Amino acid sequence: MLFNSWTFLVFFSVVVGLYYLLSHRWQNRMLLVASYFFYGWWDWRFLSLIFISTATDYICGIQIYEHQRPEVKKRFLIISVVVNLSLLGFFKYWGFFVQNFVTLLSTVGINANIATLHIILPVGISFYTFQTMTYSIDIYRGEIEPTHNFFDFALFVSFFPQLVAGPIERAKNLLPQIQNDRNFDKDQMLRGLQLIFWGLFKKVFVADNLAIIVEQVYSNPAATGAEYIIATWAFAFQIYGDFSGYSDIARGTAKCLGIELMVNFRQPYFAVNPSELWRHWHISLSTWLRDYLYIPLGGNRKGTIKTYRNLLLTMLLGGLWHGAAWNFVIWGAFHGFLLTAHRFFTTFKRSTSRFGSHLLSYMIKAFFMFHLTCLGWIFFRAQTFEHIKLIFNQIFSGFSLTPDSEEMLFKVLFFSAIPIFVMAVETFKALRPVLFSNNVFLKYCQFSNLPFQLKNVAYAALTYLLCFYGAKAQAFIYFQF
Amino acid sequence: MKNKHLTLRKIATVCISISLFLLTLEVAARLDDRLKYGAPFLKLYSPQRLRGIDPDGIKHNVPNSSFEKWHINRFGFRGPDISLQKPTGTIRIACMGTSETFGLHETPGSDWPAQLRDMLSISGHFQVINASVAGLLLKEYVGYIDKYVLKFQPDIILLYINPFGYAIGVDKFDNRQDSLEPQVRTNQTKPKFSFKSISIHLRIVSKIKQAIRNALPPAILRSYRLMNMKKQIKWLESARLNGNNPIDAVSQDSLDRFSTDLEELLEFLNNQHVQVVLTSYPVLISSSNIEEYLEIFLDHRRFYVELSLLGIIDASHKFNEMIRNMALKHNVTFIDNNNKVPKNTRYFADNVHYTDAGATIIAENFANFISTNFVTVKSLDSSVDTM
């Protein structure tokens, strides 16, 4: 069931309609049933995986909390991690590892015939397994207490707005909200609907339109270098519109149900360095990787070399989390390398320069960082090594601007102009908050500061673009992860 | 009192908000039309701007006019500009017809005359003119061809005649068309304001309708259309049939009138020494697929509510038979397109108009005939010219 479908509209209307008629206890039960229904709409058989993950962590969580001996606590934590990672490993990575193992054997002259089983990837498995694990780990760390209400916990794991593509929530944020009473709040409902609208706009108008351009170029081996560059810019905004759009719809949907989910994106393309990029892009994953992988590996507390190793390893696994394919591994490694290089240079730079204080230098750095990010997107979007090679060959040898590529560039600018403007305003506001309160023009550049009727006009204009320039509904990119 | 004041204020705010929202949508629609099609921002923008009636009372396309995907050239034809004088050694083909020939649902450049132009362009001997006018009746062909087409010295005229207007009596149908399209008749005067005309003036209305049609799941859309059509048909039947049942067979009077007008046209063209090609009139609906395309049938029947299903099928058979017989009688080439276009929605966008694929079949049928019968003649002509 896609967020951008009529089916979801009907489903959500029914859920919200019933929700506020019920008592807290029945609200949770109804949401649980709705969440299982929502997931089962794709493939009901995979509900069993969610149930296994839920039951495991529910039991492990209680056992970790109730046992006093550290080795017993650890044993239950290991059970939780192993069960979740086994589910993820088998359903997502089995085929990938077997295939690469067979290739490796064949290079040394051994012809192995191991079944890859052609396993279907269950939607959202990377998201809910990571989310469930945080529960057991946080109990083990003594950060939260377990819940004894199985239904509440099952709802925490399967809460439909964020079940299939995040944000990856932490138990300490989501679980208390599920356990507490939630009453109808008009303002929260309105903010939720606004977020849903904005998310839909980013998905249907920005991402799905840019997807057409990206597909047209990336599936054409004869595309020129200029076309690849433009299509990569398009992909940068496609994936941003797609994923941040999904996150906004998820947050908006949850808000309508009285639940606050974490912010997943904060103007990522105005980041000025790799470290900032990962604090603004897919925040729920990057903080997950930081808290449950990078820091346990030692973080930056065990010397420079180990810090670099930890950064590289974290990003490598972060890349692999996105998909069982080498291009994702390369993409992760690329970002690991960027983070390492940035760490190296910042250590060096701190004592020599205060370059970052000027707006112009900020913009130059953001521009440079955006293009480094785009470089990474080439690895992410390309299908094979040969494809990556072809793209770089074309960019560096077959670069020519044709009328077709100029038209393409115009389209990319048209479809990405609004998110760029919004990101720019938000970034500028964060940089120069005083200017935003003193300058009338700048003040009204920010949507939340607009007078009510001007907001109304803006919504009408966006509605027009959404209805008459929105592309046909397509699945969200992050569903495949 | 204070509460009442607050409530009134709230109501006023809601009304203003809704009005402002709709106004913005309308402005956006007008800006969009302006940027996309060069449409006027304030004036009425409807398909009627493509057609007009001249001082002699002849319907024609308005030269240099355009509406959305439709563009009329400086001589009043759909398609690229041509010279008044026929280039030496060129065979000019004029495609005469109504909306099926003019092109309605096809993508730009895919109406059958445009496709025929592309198909014949390889040889370099032919020039195809789309001389059709949407809504033109057979009885009006002579006047229109005489005034607007013959000056281009066409060698061949392909006649694709819509006979359905005659099925319920051509004069009755003509009057009804006029009442449906007041702008055509009163081109010079401003249309009067009415609530019905709001939807004509507000561009956002048709755009929203189209967006809903595109967004709705096909099954829901079909059910809605069926329900809507049935309601309309019921209303039309009560307004036009005066309690009588719709007729199952087209009247002899109607057939005779059609026959007379067609004969007059063929004789006129014969006197002008123009080679004529006649075609049958393809329709989607037959007794075997009526259930499958019920909403399309009902949509078509709205215009001929005096005819029942049997009546419409009967009209199609009888008029097509009459066109064939007339072609035989006048020794005119006849192409039976009705039997060549498969009866399904891959080829038909509604009961009588084509999709791109349907238009391709029509164009191919004409192209096959023309290229096999006229290339030799043309080659001879050219050789004479060069000598």
Image (spheres, coloured by chain):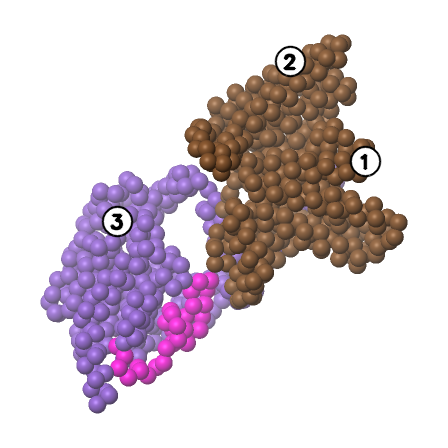
Chain colours: A brown, B purple
Residue under circle 2?
A: A59
Other-residue count near label 2 (Cα within 10 Å), few / some / many at <14 / 14–19 / ≥20: some
Q: Nearer the viewer, residue B222 or A236?
A: A236
Determine the residue positioned at 55% across, 39% down: A325
Q: Which residues are magenta?
A: B63-91
Secondary structure at numbered mark 1: loop
Q: Chain of mark 3?
A: B
**Which residue has dot 3 on it?**
B343
Q: Is residue B238 magenta?
A: no
- Quadrant for the C terminus of chain B in the image: bottom left
Instruction: Work out whether A414 lies above or below B13.
Output: below
Q: State yes or no: discs 2 and 3 in contact (Cβ < 8 Å).
A: no
Disc 3 crowd, CA 10 A, few/some/many (<14, 14-19, 20+): some
**Alpha carbons under labels 1 and 2: distance apart:** 38 Å
Residue B29 seen in render: no
**Residue reaching furthest to the front:** A109
Q: Which residue is mark 1?
A: A303
Distance between the alpha carbons at the discs numbered 2 and 3: 64 Å
Which is closer to the viewer, label 2 or label 3?
A: 2
Is residue A62 positioned above or below B33 on the image? Answer: above
Residue at mark 2 shares a chain with residue at mark 3: no
Q: Position of residue A149 (x, y in %)?
A: 66, 14
Q: Are marks 1 and 2 in contact (CB under 8 Å)?
A: no
